[in-house]
Structure formats: structure tokens, C-alpha cells
Image: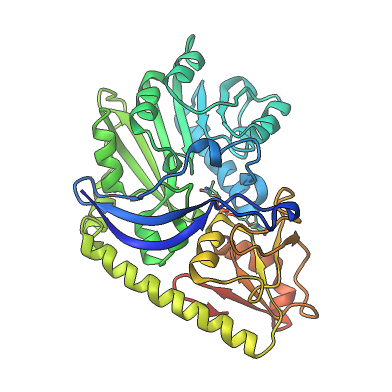
């Protein structure tokens, strides 16, 4: 039984950036509500949007856009090569190739339904299937050779049909093959009051206890787990078929489960407490923007993220609060953020002569961004962060 615990209002599709021509058109909106399934411990949005509406040839998000992610994928690829020595890898959701580009073209295959992104890796001569991952595709890819390793980062939380996904994964793994999933951690999301992890694309935010239950249905189990810093705190799950006795279960798994149970991720009351914190966060953020307006300060946004879409629309912030956003992604530039209709401009180094305060939409890249903007900070420039609670820093 799924119980709703959070209502984030009517939201546009988080990555549907609006062109100038369509500024006056009505946008597609959907009710963004989040619920907890007390039987499976799964947190999900209650109304989903069809995958074709979100992941198509106009998908703007590129994993390679940040130094942090490029480095993280490179480092993990190095570890994979030394630790697992895979001869055949499949990546589900290969995006613009930030992960697969670290491997020899002969041993890796990408699956990416957003054709504009698949085009990038194809151009770089990486075998890429511009299709949605499913059983039919998995059979085609592994007709001659099963995969030693399937990797998927920030993708499984976007796919609704577990049955199709995990059956396809089971079809594709070799006897000793493993699956590695990397997705935002529900524990971190709650600890950070990062309610902006909920938007149309994030159907689920997984905990270990929920993922474990899903995997059991497909005879799969987690044999190791690592906490990573990416996207505000993620988990990297190392998964195997129960018949694969090549790996032993690391005690990290039990540790993580205990941490989650101690926090109460198995109880509805925990999510209700989170909701109260979200209300407070919203109130405080609105207050901050009001006070900046009173002082007549020049406020812009930094990083036109999907996450910002949730925050801006939930808190009712618009171009009266934030003059424009800076972003480095070419596809987003000169378009408007969905719902709030704030213009996205081509990134320029922040200059105290023009800007007093920047709202950090890409708060998950705080360290990278603060390093880049150290001159602005030294000259007295400020940032607004809304996690773990709204403040000016
Ligand atoms: P970032 C997307 O979410 C969507 P978003 C998706 N659903 C998902 O799960 C995560 O990614 C993984 C810009 N930027 O990564 C680039 C700068 O302008 O937080 C990006 O537009 N300057 C698949 O959109 C945005 O910020 C910079 O210096 O919430 C970051 O988006 C840096 C570092 C980033 O993901």
C-alpha cells in the first residue's frame, strides 16, 4: 500500500526547456506527489510521465558537463579494469559517453535512447544502441557473448518497468557477471532535505532496503555497497545473481542496511518528518529571496538543473527573484527554465560588478563551482544554497 507523504504541486517536465517562440504556450504539467510503500520500503513519485516525453532526441542533460562527473567516471573505470578485468561491458544509459569513453571500444557497448546523446558516442566510434533497454535489445546485444559487467548510473531510478529491466539484465550476464548500479541515496536525500531529487524523471529514489526487495524477485542480491559523493550523495551497488558464487557478500551491505533502519527508512513516520522539514525549507528560501529583493541585490541562478525546476516551481520563484541562470550546456542556453520561465544564459565567470548573489541550482557541484568562482567569493560575492537548509554563504 503506497502512502503519499509529499505534494510538490503541479510541475512541468524538468528538462523541457522552453524556446522563446513557445514562451506563451501552455506547458504540460503533472501532479508531483511522492509516496512510500510500507511493504517494499520503496519511495516513488505517484504519477509518472511516459518515457518518450522525457527521454527523446531533445534531451539536454550531458554527464560530461562537469569536471566532477568526468573525474568520477574515469576513476571508477580504472577501478573496474583492475578489480574485475571485464572483457565485455554494457552500459545502460550511456548518455554522452562520460563512462564508456574510459574503455577500449572493443569491450564496451552503450545503450542510450536519447538519440542526440547516442549520436555523440556513435561519432566517437563507440558501439551504441539508441534504444530503450529491454529484453529484446538485451538478446540482440548478447547474442554471441554475455556481459561480464553491466553498469548503470543515474538511470535505473528513471525506469518504471522493473520486470522488463531486470529480466533483460539476467538474460545478459555471464556466469560470473555482475551488475553495478549507481543512484542517489534516499538516506542522503532525506538528511539533506533535498526534496529536489523528486521530479518527473526520478520515478524512484532508492534505499538499500528497497533495492534489496526488488532484486530478490529476480534472484539478484547486493554483494557490496559504496557511498559516493556524486549528486549530493549516491550509492554504488554491486549486484550478482544468487547462483553466482564467485563473490562473497561484504559486511558493508549489512552496515548500510542497519544505518538505514536506524534512520527509519522503513517507517512512514520518517517521511512525514521529512515533509515538515520540506515545508520549513520552502518558507525559509522564500524569505531569503524576499530579503534580497528588498535590498535590491542582483541575484542570478547557477546551474539550470532538473532539480532547480522542482525548487523554483514548488516555491513559486521566477524572474522577479532570479534575473537569469548561467549554465554551460549548449542546449539549455537561450532557452527558459520550465515553469518559472527564467532565461538561461551562456556561462560567464561570476563578476561582482554585475552579480551580488547566485542561487546554486547545481548545489551537488558546490566544491567544483566554488573553486571556479573563487575571485567572486573573495570579492564578497555570495551564494544561496537550499540544502541541508536554505542559507546565504
Ligand atoms: P546536475 C540530471 O539532473 C538529470 P540535474 C537526470 N535525471 C539525473 O538523474 C541527473 O542529472 C544525474 C551545469 N553546470 O548534474 C551543467 C554549470 O553550468 O546537477 C548542468 O546543466 N557549471 C539524468 O540537471 C547542471 O549545471 C558548472 O560548473 O539536476 C548540473 O546538473 C557545473 C559543475 C555544472 O543534474
Q: Is residue 191 shown left or right of residue 83? A: left
Q: Quadrant location of ligand 1?
A: bottom right
Q: Residue furthest bottom?
A: 295
Residue 248 can be seen in this image: no
> In the rendered view, would you say 150 is above or below 255?
above
Quarter of the image where one finds residue 357: bottom right
> In the rendered view, would you say 99 is above or below 206?
above
Q: Is residue 312 shown left or right of residue 161? A: right
Q: Is residue 131 shown left or right of residue 35? A: right
> In the rendered view, would you say 350 is above or below 251?
below
Residue at 45%, 15% in the rendered image: 139
Residue at 26%, 57% in the rendered image: 265
Residue 336 can be seen in this image: yes
Q: Residue furthest front?
A: 25
**Residue 326 percent location from the top left of the image:** 71, 63
Residue at 74%, 75% in the rendered image: 375
Of residue 231 and residue 282, the one placed in the foreground of this image is 282
**Residue 174 percent location from the top left of the image:** 39, 18
**Residue 225 percent location from the top left of the image:** 35, 45
In the rendered image, the quadrant that contains the C terminus is bottom right
**Residue 217 percent location from the top left of the image:** 24, 31
Of residue 279 and residue 375, the one placed in the foreground of this image is 279
Amino acid at each position: 500500500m503506497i502512502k503519499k507523504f509529499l505534494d510538490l504541486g503541479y510541475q512541468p517536465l524538468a528538462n523541457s526547456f522552453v524556446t522563446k517562440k513557445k514562451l506563451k504556450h501552455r506547458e504540460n504539467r503533472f501532479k508531483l506527489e511522492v509516496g512510500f510503500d510500507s511493504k517494499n520500503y520503496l519511495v516513488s513519485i505517484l504519477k509518472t510521465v511516459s518515457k518518450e516525453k522525457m527521454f527523446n532526441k531533445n534531451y539536454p542533460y550531458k554527464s560530461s558537463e562537469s569536471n566532477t562527473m568526468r573525474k568520477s567516471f574515469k576513476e571508477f573505470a580504472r577501478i573496474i579494469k583492475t578489480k574485475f578485468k571485464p572483457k565485455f561491458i554494457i552500459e545502460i544509459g550511456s548518455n554522452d559517453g562520460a563512462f564508456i569513453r574510459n574503455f577500449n571500444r572493443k569491450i564496451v557497448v552503450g545503450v542510450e535512447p536519447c538519440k542526440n546523446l547516442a549520436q555523440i558516442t556513435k561519432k566517437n566510434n563507440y558501439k551504441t544502441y539508441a534504444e530503450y533497454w529491454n529484453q529484446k535489445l538485451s538478446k540482440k546485444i548478447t547474442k554471441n557473448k554475455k556481459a561480464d559487467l553491466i553498469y548503470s548510473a543515474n538511470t535505473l531510478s528513471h525506469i518504471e518497468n522493473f520486470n522488463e529491466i531486470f529480466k533483460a539484465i539476467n538474460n545478459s550476464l555471464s556466469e560470473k557477471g555482475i551488475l553495478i548500479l549507481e543512484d542517489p541515496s534516499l538516506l542522503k536525500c532525506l538528511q539533506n532535505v533535498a526534496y529536489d531529487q523528486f521530479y518527473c524523471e526520478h520515478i524512484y529514489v532508492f534505499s538499500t532496503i528497497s533495492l534489496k526487495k526488488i532484486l530478490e524477485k529476480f534472484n539478484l542480491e547486493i554483494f557490496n555497497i559504496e557511498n559516493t559523493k556524486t549528486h549530493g550523495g549516491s550509492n554504488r551497488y554491486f549486484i550478482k545473481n544468487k547462483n553466482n558464487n564467485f563473490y562473497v557478500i561484504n559486511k558493508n551491505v549489512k552496515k548500510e542496511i542497519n544505518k538505514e533502519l536506524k534512520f527509519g527508512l522503513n517507517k512512514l513516520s520518517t517521511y512525514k518528518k521529512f515533509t515538515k522539514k520540506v515545508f520549513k525549507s520552502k518558507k525559509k528560501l522564500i524569505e531569503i529571496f524576499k530579503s534580497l529583493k528588498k535590498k535590491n541585490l542582483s541575484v542570478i541562478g547557477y546551474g539550470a538543473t532538473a532539480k532547480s525546476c522542482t525548487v523554483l516551481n514548488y516555491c513559486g520563484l521566477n524572474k522577479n527573484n532570479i534575473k537569469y541562470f548561467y549554465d554551460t550546456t549548449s542546449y539549455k542556453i537561450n532557452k527558459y527554465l520550465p515553469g518559472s520561465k527564467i532565461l538561461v544564459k551562456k556561462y560567464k565567470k561570476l563578476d561582482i560588478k554585475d552579480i551580488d548573489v547566485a542561487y546554486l541550482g547545481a548545489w551537488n557541484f558546490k566544491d567544483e563551482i566554488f573553486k571556479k568562482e573563487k575571485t567572486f567569493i573573495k570579492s564578497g560575492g555570495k551564494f544561496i544554497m537550499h540544502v541541508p537548509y536554505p542559507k546565504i554563504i
